[in-house]
Image (cartoon, rainbow, N blue to C red):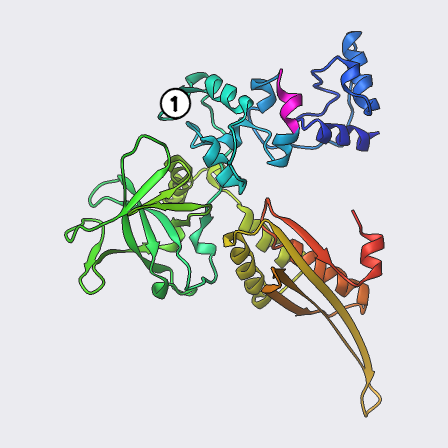
Amino acid sequence: MEIRLLQSQIDEWLPNNILNKWRYNNLAAFRNDLTAKILCAANNFGLGFKTNNLLELNMNGILPIQDILPDEYRKIKDQLRKRDLMFIDQLIANNSTLFTWEQLNNTLNFTSKGKIPKWWIKLENILIDNHNERSIKQEFICDYKKNSFNTRFLYILNIDRRRFYWIVTRKRKKSTNFFYTIFGKLINDSFSYSNKKCNIIHYIQQNTNDTNIHLTQCKNKNCNSGTWNSSKLHCEITISKSKSLKIDGKISKNNQTWIIKQPIALCDQILQSLVTSNSENTLRDIRVDDTDNRIFLIKNYLHMNEKYIEQLMIIYNQLKDLDINDIIVYTDGSLNRYIDQDNNLHIEQGFGWVIIDNNNKIAEFKGASKGWPSSTRMELLAVVTVLMIIPKYKSVQIYTDSNNVITKFNV
């Protein structure tokens, strides 16, 4: 019974236990869902349900999208589920600024080509006061759950020195408690995993009519924020990695201007917590992002050493930066038993995988394992480790020659 309730909650993409909150009463709208039909009938007869210690699916958010668009919600639920959207929290930066449709899809790694959906236009009209500034109406302002899209620069273990990395940080104005936001392009040669600081080429944010971030390179030889490099002819700033973010998502260029398709509020809300002193921190400021979760799982559930963790996180960050949505992986595991000249039994077992794109190898990983000898366990370890480093919102196809994995763990 509990599984059926959870399945109906997921199918209808609802934030609450459906026994406690069910808004529908039209049985004909739910042809193949008996649970939904029973709940509709109960609503028609004015019946309610009392729940005791039922297994519940907890969704984290403050204001459900269904509360704002109750009439359209069933028509758009599949679009929302595809993008993993359920709450207004996910559409707002810094509790005050609504994303544009283009910015939202950029943070979700979806294309924004085609017409803007009618439900999104209606949502904008309901939520925002000023369409230029994208500021939300006073009645919708509250302490929403923070959106963490960009990556904490502290967690970047390695970089591809052939690529550009855009960085945003905050610096304190001299002799004041005022912080201001600084953008820049990483000087790759200044990056070292063991060094807490690195250098960026300073870029200045331009005033524009939209809420995207527009940047041009600083040409001021007497800039108060950085130091002029006379040989390279650019302004350099030394930054602390612990107080900086690597900007993710698509970045375009128009003449000499770089355009970051996200509101400045999305950067500011996280940067504010990074530069707050320990005495000013509260529990709600402490955040565990996607990278933290993956390191924790790999370290505590797979019990891998630091060398393997570092390799996996390098691949994870590499995949996040690649413009590939469909990832193809070939996995393998092996177990080898042999007896040496002294008649001692030896057991060697290992696993590995390789990620392919257009017949080109993108990344590979190899590992060994101690403990109970099992070839199936090695095949499973290969699958589990690769799943732990696939970035959110990307699909993956896994190819394995293990019949046990295919037949027993197919979902």
Q: Which segment did they paint magenta?
A: 71-77
Residue at 57% x, 68% y: name it.
Answer: 307
**Can residue 276 be seen?**
no
Q: Is residue 226 visible?
A: yes
| Magenta-colored segment: predominant secondary structure | helix
Which residue does the image show at 36% across and 42% down from the upper left? 259
Q: Is residue 93 magenta?
A: no
User: Quick one: which residue is furthest to the top in this view?
Assistant: 45
Vertically, is 180 above or below 118?
A: below
Side of 118 where 384 appears, left or right: right
Measuring from the top left, give residue 71's x and y in whole percent: 62, 15
Q: Is 208 on the left-hand or right-hand side of 301?
A: left
Q: Residue at x 67, y 25 (%)?
A: 16
The N terminus - image quarter: top right
On the image, the x and y values in percent for residue 297 come to 63, 53
Residue 411 image offset from top left, x and y in percent: 78, 46
Residue pointed to by mark 1: 131
Along the viewing direction, whichever of 372 and 394 lies nearer the viewer: 394
Query: Residue 190's image quarter?
Result: bottom left
Residue that appears at 81% across and 30% down: 4
- Of 8 and 270, the residue lying toward us: 8
- Queried whether the magenta region covers residue 72, the answer comes back as yes
Kind of residue at disc 1 = His
SS assignment at label 1: loop
